[in-house]
């Protein structure tokens, strides 16, 4: 029990709290220590020193970001994940600027939510697969990182195929289906990609790939990606 990740769920809808709590409680490495709908209830649970907060974005009377901002002012440093219905780029940007470690969507598959929470707990910045392209657009104007532009040459052909699909927002499960390989094999390849590129998250790897390929609006690059994807799917 002591080695389990202690999680607090924050959502103003009781049905959502119950459903997510049941999902995570069945995971061997999670311990849901509470599910609440207000900042007052949350403050009480924070005294139990949870490892992670999983919060809804749209709540009343105080939304998730306002609640997190207030907690930060009070000295709370517990990592937070937003689990929301909003696929708005503006909401994603606000959440990232507020310092959240994950931005997940409620229509994600249950296993994807569980996997994402584990990755956040391991130190990654994680966004929902369908939000990856929006994240890349947000970060495209940033200065290039310390990784050299030719660092992708360290990857094998298969790893580049997987990174290409990852940069389009595909989940591990979708990549496995596209390339006709197992889910675990995809996870192993992703770990190797991050290690080779010395990156801490899938998002950073996707941004690096996108910068090398040019903007998503580049018709030639988009066409090449679509053709490559079709070829991969026919293997």
Image (tube, rainbow, N blue to C red):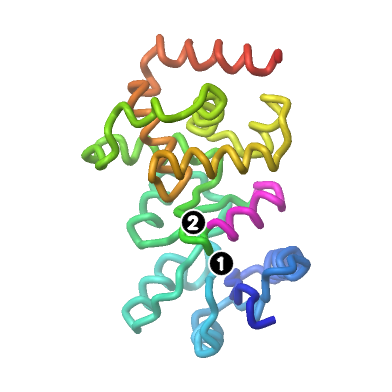
Structural crowding at the residue carrying mark 1, measured as other residues with C-alpha within 10 Å and reported as few (<14), some (14–19) or many (≥20): many
Q: Sequence-wise, which precedes: disc 1 or disc 2?
A: 1
In x, y percent, where is residue 217? 38, 19
Based on the picture, tell me whether residue 172 belongs to the magenta stretch.
no
In x, y percent, where is residue 68? 42, 71
For the N terminus, the image quarter is bottom right
Please tell me which residue lies in front, 133 or 144.
144
Q: Residue at x 56, y 55 (%)?
A: 84
Task: Indicate whether 216 appears above or below 166.
Answer: above
As drawn, the label of residue 230 is none
For the C terminus, the image quarter is top right
Q: Which residues, given as a range, are shown in magenta?
A: 107-119
State how far apart marks 1 and 2 are (Cα). Answer: 9 Å
Q: How many marks?
A: 2
Q: Residue at x 38, y 36 (%)?
A: 207
Based on the picture, tell me whether residue 118 belongs to the magenta stretch.
yes
Q: Would residue 229 appear left or right of 28 to someone viewing this image?
A: left
Q: Would residue 212 appear left or right of 54 to someone viewing this image?
A: left
Tell me the residue that label 1 is attached to: 54
In x, y percent, where is residue 20? 70, 64
Tell me the residue that label 2 is attached to: 102
In x, y percent, where is residue 159? 53, 29
Q: Residue at x 67, y 76 (%)?
A: 32
Q: Would residue 68 appear left or right of 161 to someone viewing this image?
A: left
Task: Report helix, strand or loop for mark 2.
Answer: strand
Mark 1–mark 2 contact, CB under 8 Å? no
Task: Indicate whether 151 appears above or below 91.
Answer: above
């Amino acid at each position: 029990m002591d080695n389990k990740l202690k999680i607090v769920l924050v959502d103003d809808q009781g049905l959502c709290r119950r459903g997510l709590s049941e999902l995570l409680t069945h995971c061997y490495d999670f311990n849901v220590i509470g599910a609440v709908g207000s900042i007052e209830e949350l403050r009480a649970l924070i005294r139990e020193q949870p490892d992670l907060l999983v919060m809804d974005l749209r709540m009343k009377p105080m939304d998730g970001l306002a609640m997190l901002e207030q907690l930060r002012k009070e000295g709370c440093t517990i990592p937070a994940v937003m689990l929301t219905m909003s696929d708005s780029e503006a909401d994603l940007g606000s959440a990232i600027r507020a310092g959240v470690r994950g931005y997940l969507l409620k229509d994600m598959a249950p296993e994807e939510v569980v996997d994402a929470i584990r990755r956040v707990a391991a130190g990654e910045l994680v966004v929902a697969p369908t939000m990856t392209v929006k994240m890349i657009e947000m970060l495209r104007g940033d200065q290039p990182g310390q990784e050299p532009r030719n660092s992708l040459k360290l990857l094998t052909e298969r790893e580049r195929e997987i990174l290409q699909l990852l940069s389009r927002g595909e989940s591990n499960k979708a990549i496995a289906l596209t390339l006709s390989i197992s889910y675990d094999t995809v996870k192993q390849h992703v770990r190797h990609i991050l290690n080779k590129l010395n990156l801490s998250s899938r998002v950073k790897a996707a941004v690096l790939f996108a910068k090398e390929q040019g903007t998503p609006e580049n018709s030639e690059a988009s066409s090449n990606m679509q053709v490559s994807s079709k070829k991969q799917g026919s293997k």
